[in-house]
Image: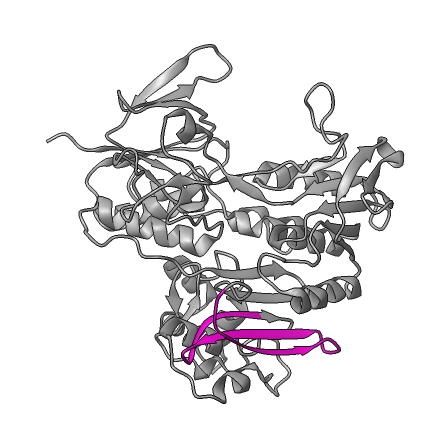
Amino acid sequence: MTRERLVVVGNGMAATRLVEELLARGYDGHVTVLGDEDTPAYNRILLSAVLEGTHPRDAIALADPLAHDPERLTVRLGCRVLDLDRGRREVMLAVGDRPGHEQLAYDRLVLATGSIPTLPPIRGLVRMDGRLHPAVNAFRSLADCDRLEAAVSSRAPGRTRAVVVGGGLLGLQVARALTVRGVVTEVVEGTEHLLSRQLGTPGGRILARDLRRLGTEVYTGTRAVRLSGEGPTTGLSLDNGFTLATDLVVLAAGGRPSTALARRAGLLVRRGVVVDGRLASVTDDRVHAIGDCAERRGVTTGFVPPAWEQASALAGLLAGGTEEYAESRTVARLRATGLDVAVLGDPERTDGEVVEMTNPLAGSHRRLVVRDGVIVAAALVGDLSRVGLITQHYDRRTVLGPHEPGELLAPETSGTTEDASPARLDDDVEVCACAGVTAGRVRACAGLEEVRSTTRATTGCGGCAPVVRRLLEPATAPA
């Protein structure tokens, strides 16, 4: 019997999880992974930690699936996919710099192409020859990180200025990394407050206040409109009339699903590749899409946990299962030194009763959205002392009493900033949203390295690391 030929376009976090799950479930086909970068798969969420210097470059590498079963898997790096012929079930690959292309046949195809950065409409950003202005840096890939790291390292600390365009999760992570490296950093955000997709005005203002306290200036409600000059005369002009002198400009103003290949192949694409419950294109059931490039019921996610859930669900289906993909929870964590933010669901747009507590002096903002006694969304800024318990209730859809939401928002008295009492978490409570790891699985491990290697906790966004370390304390404490 001929083995099914499965081709995966993309070699990011979703694709890697898919391959790991397929091998673990005994999928009997042959998998070929096509990655356009020259480097093995890595954790993009931790790129800012590499830039900051808190993580070595090799620490963000994902597990090598070839080490598990090279007979069932081929990974091709530096491989650019030109086109997709659905009639012949072939993908066309570029062959180095030579003209022509290579054809690779498939029986089933998975698009895991992720997202691509968007270029904001700033005059002077792109030169007449099509190249970016030399001061401009994207921050989406390891190569981007290396280029920015080289630019920072070549200049004296405290004498380099940078402007980060974009006040979302990525922009704030990069801004903090640059500030920690001694770069005088400013953030420009076009909406009225930071993290406007996740937080309301009170939370965004507290976050801006925290950033300024940490040495990063913030400009909200204004847009960058023009980049002029070069070298020491480079200036970024804003639409409020100010011009920021800078050496570096980092673009972090969001991204969009990478769907050009799908569009050219005639698949239905709205914002992302439209898929059904089997994560198959509604146009062609032999083509699947997962991660940032997939759109299910009008929603594209852009976060790691849903991408990994989709990968796991698709692996089950391809290995012979019948359970379709259910809707994912959206869990967002800001991973930046000195800033603490956790968002469950969509607290600004979800219907329900709002319980809110804000203390600008202490730099904390906490918001719960409760419907029929159940937490359906939450946002925590500055004080994450109850994030574990709130997540526990959110996951379990616990029906709370009338006074419990307010009690959950009251800060712990121990003065810690995250889950002061992890022992209170039941074993089946999920502490790592990225990898779906429970407190019990963490407690069963002998140490942090075992947690990372056997459960993948702390290897996603990294936001669960403090809780994981405290859960391990009884196991690692000296006798």
Magenta span main SS: strand
**Which residue is nearer to you in this view: 208 or 464?**
208
Q: Is residue 376 magenta?
A: yes
Looking at the rendered image, the quarter that the N terminus falls into is top left
Q: Residue at x 35, y 43 (%)?
A: 65
Q: Residue at x 60, y 36 (%)?
A: 143
Residue 75 spot, x, y in % from top left: 37, 33
Q: Is residue 275 magenta?
A: no
Q: Residue at x 68, y 69 (%)?
A: 202
- Up-down relation of residue 169 to residue 131 (above or below): below
- Up-down relation of residue 188 to residue 384 (above or below): above
Residue 467 spot, x, y in % from top left: 51, 72
Which residue is most to the right?
233
Does residue 368 show up? yes
Does residue 472 show up? no
Q: Residue at x 46, y 25 (%)?
A: 80
| Left or right, residue 316 beside residue 20 | left
| Left or right, residue 232 beside residue 90 | right
Which residue is most to the top?
99
User: Which quadrant of the structure image shows residue 211?
Assistant: bottom right
- Up-down relation of residue 340 to residue 43 (above or below): below
Residue segment shown in magenta: 350-379
**Which residue is nearer to you in this view: 293 or 433?**
293
Residue 95 spot, x, y in % from top left: 44, 17
| Left or right, residue 329 beside residue 147 | left
**Which residue is nearer to you in this view: 407 or 340?**
407
Residue 392 spot, x, y in % from top left: 42, 75
User: Which quadrant of the structure image shows residue 237?
Assistant: top right
